[in-house]
Image (tube, rainbow, N blue to C red):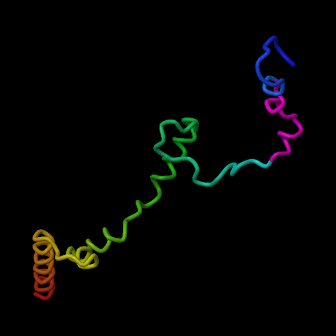
Amino acid sequence: MSGTSSVGQGSVYEAGDQRNSKNSEINDAERYKEGQPNSHLANDSKDERTIANKLAREEKRQNEPEPISKEAAESQKDPTLPARNHGNEPSKGAKIDAELKAEEEEYLKKKGKA
């Protein structure tokens, strides 16, 4: 029995399950999802990427077009379309925008013909 305590069994005080594993076992172990793509978040303040890597990423992003969501693209074509796609009545502002867009298109058609 280890120590000077006379309480409990000796196995309680022995470090049988707390021993360090061998270096050869550590190196052979399978890594848990090491190096996954897109594992770094661009705006994560705790990300440990270097400043040079962050600057290089921002330079690449300047050349990329910003992604436009499906609803944003639909609202550019017809302001009432996103609401109707969700089964709702379009708002008053969306209706007015649709009317203005129709008037502008009509005006441009007349102006082009004249």
Left of 74 or right of it: where is 13? Answer: right
Left of 102 or right of it: where is 67? Answer: right
Magenta-drawn stretch contains 16: yes
Q: Which residue is rendered at x = 82% and y = 26% of the image?
A: 15
Q: Where is residue 74 in the image (x, y as percent from the top left)?
A: 30, 74
The residue lying furthest to the front in this view is 7
The residue lying furthest to the bottom in this view is 113
The N terminus - image quarter: top right
Q: Is residue 37 above or below residue 8?
A: below
Q: Where is residue 24 in the image (x, y as percent from the top left)?
A: 89, 38
The C terminus - image quarter: bottom left
Q: Is residue 16 above or below residue 64?
A: above
Q: Which residue is rendered at x = 81% and y = 33% of the image?
A: 17
Magenta-drawn stretch contains 64: no
Task: Give the extent of the magenta segment.
Answer: 14-29
Q: Which residue is rendered at x = 45% and y = 52% of the image?
A: 62
Left of 83 or right of it: where is 69? Answer: right
